[in-house]
Image: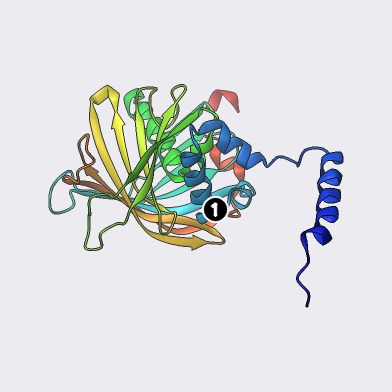
């Protein structure tokens, strides 16, 4: 077949360009627009886009209404053997409203925490808990639970600011050394579930898998560093979840220190068939 000459192709190309110009600008991509809004550079933008795609793609995630899973938290506190193990059923609403349900498992008097927007209730063995300090702790815990599970999707919330920190290779935390990662630093315009305005989280995105290898965090209030190492990524109906997240003490350089805790997610189900009313606490007797 004859290869077209420049003269053969020039007219159609010019005509196509004119047609596209007449049709106006191409429609914008709302996800890409959001990524552009919260990132500081093409490097950060490219890393975040690739990461979201590796986890299943934002359009697929955005269609999900809720999630439920079994959650196991093993607390080591720097000791070689676990000091405490807690198991819970956790359910989250995935809309704009903060909705969290946490039920203790394998305990004779389970606590059930419910958070729906600003409304919070806590029961133990079916009875309301009146201890204000315990309620405040469990309400904060519920918000952290939600924020942790929603990562990485919450990285493009409008209060987020993501700046490129270059390419780094994390220190190994196990037998398999990690490869080079694109690092983006997450800060906030105002206080969110993820921390205060002076806090930051360095997200290490693998250049090989485009999944998160680890999150190096700084909490300004306590001048404290933590390192969360993500592993065992699994696919649940098209959405990938890091089902094991080990948290270590750390320092400003991201060193792997003593093991503090291991969080594990199992039996993850998106769009689970539970009644959204579970996020509402029991009404006080006087309001019935």
Residue receiving disc 1 = 53
Count of marks, rendered view: 1
Q: Rate crowding at label 1 as few (under 14), some (14 to 19) or many (20 or more) other CA atoms within 10 Å.
A: some
Q: Residue furthest left?
A: 80
Figure check: 207 above or below 31: below
Figure check: 2 above or below 243: below
Q: In this orientation, does residue 126 appear?
A: no
Q: Quadrant of residue 266?
A: bottom left
Figure check: 199 above or below 7: above
Query: What x and y, as percent, mark residue 141?
Result: 37, 35
Query: What x and y, as percent, mark residue 278?
Result: 55, 42
Q: Nearer the viewer, residue 184 or 158?
A: 184
Q: Is residue 287 left or right of residue 213?
A: right
Q: Quadrant of residue 4?
A: bottom right
Q: In this orientation, does residue 102 appear?
A: yes
Figure check: 81 above or below 160: below
Q: Residue at x 28, y 22 (%)?
A: 221
Q: Nearer the viewer, residue 281 or 139?
A: 139
Q: Secondary structure at mark 1?
A: helix
Query: What x and y, as percent, mark residue 22?
Result: 87, 40
Q: Residue at x 57, y 48 (%)?
A: 66
Q: How is the image coloured?
A: rainbow
**Quarter of the C terminus within the rendering:** top right
């Amino acid at each position: 077949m004859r290869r077209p000459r420049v003269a053969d192709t020039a007219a159609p190309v010019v005509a196509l360009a004119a047609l596209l110009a007449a049709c106006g600008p191409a429609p914008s991509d709302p996800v890409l627009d959001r990524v552009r809004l919260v990132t500081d550079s093409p490097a950060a933008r490219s890393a975040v886009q690739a990461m979201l795609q590796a986890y299943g793609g934002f359009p697929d995630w955005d269609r999900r209404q809720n999630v439920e899973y079994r959650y196991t938290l093993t607390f080591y506190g720097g000791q070689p053997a676990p000091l405490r193990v807690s198991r819970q059923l956790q359910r989250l609403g995935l809309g704009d409203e903060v909705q969290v349900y946490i039920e203790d498992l394998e305990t004779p008097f389970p606590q059930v925490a419910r958070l729906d927007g600003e409304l919070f209730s806590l029961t133990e063995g079916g009875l309301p808990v009146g201890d204000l300090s315990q309620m405040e702790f469990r309400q904060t815990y519920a918000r952290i639970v939600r924020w942790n599970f929603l990562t990485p999707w919450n990285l493009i919330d409008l209060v987020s600011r993501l700046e490129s920190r270059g390419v780094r290779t994390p220190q190994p935390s196990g037998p398999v050394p990690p490869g080079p990662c694109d690092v983006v630093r997450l800060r906030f315009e105002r206080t969110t579930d993820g921390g205060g305005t002076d806090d930051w989280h360095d997200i290490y995105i693998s250049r090989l898998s485009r999944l998160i290898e680890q999150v190096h965090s700084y909490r300004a209030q306590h001048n404290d560093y933590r390192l969360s190492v993500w592993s065992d990524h699994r696919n649940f109906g098209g959405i990938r979840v890091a089902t094991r997240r080990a948290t270590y003490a750390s320092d400003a350089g991201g060193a792997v220190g003593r093991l503090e805790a291991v969080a594990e997610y199992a039996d993850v189900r998106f769009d689970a068939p539970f009644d959204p009313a579970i996020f509402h606490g029991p009404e006080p007797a006087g309001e019935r």
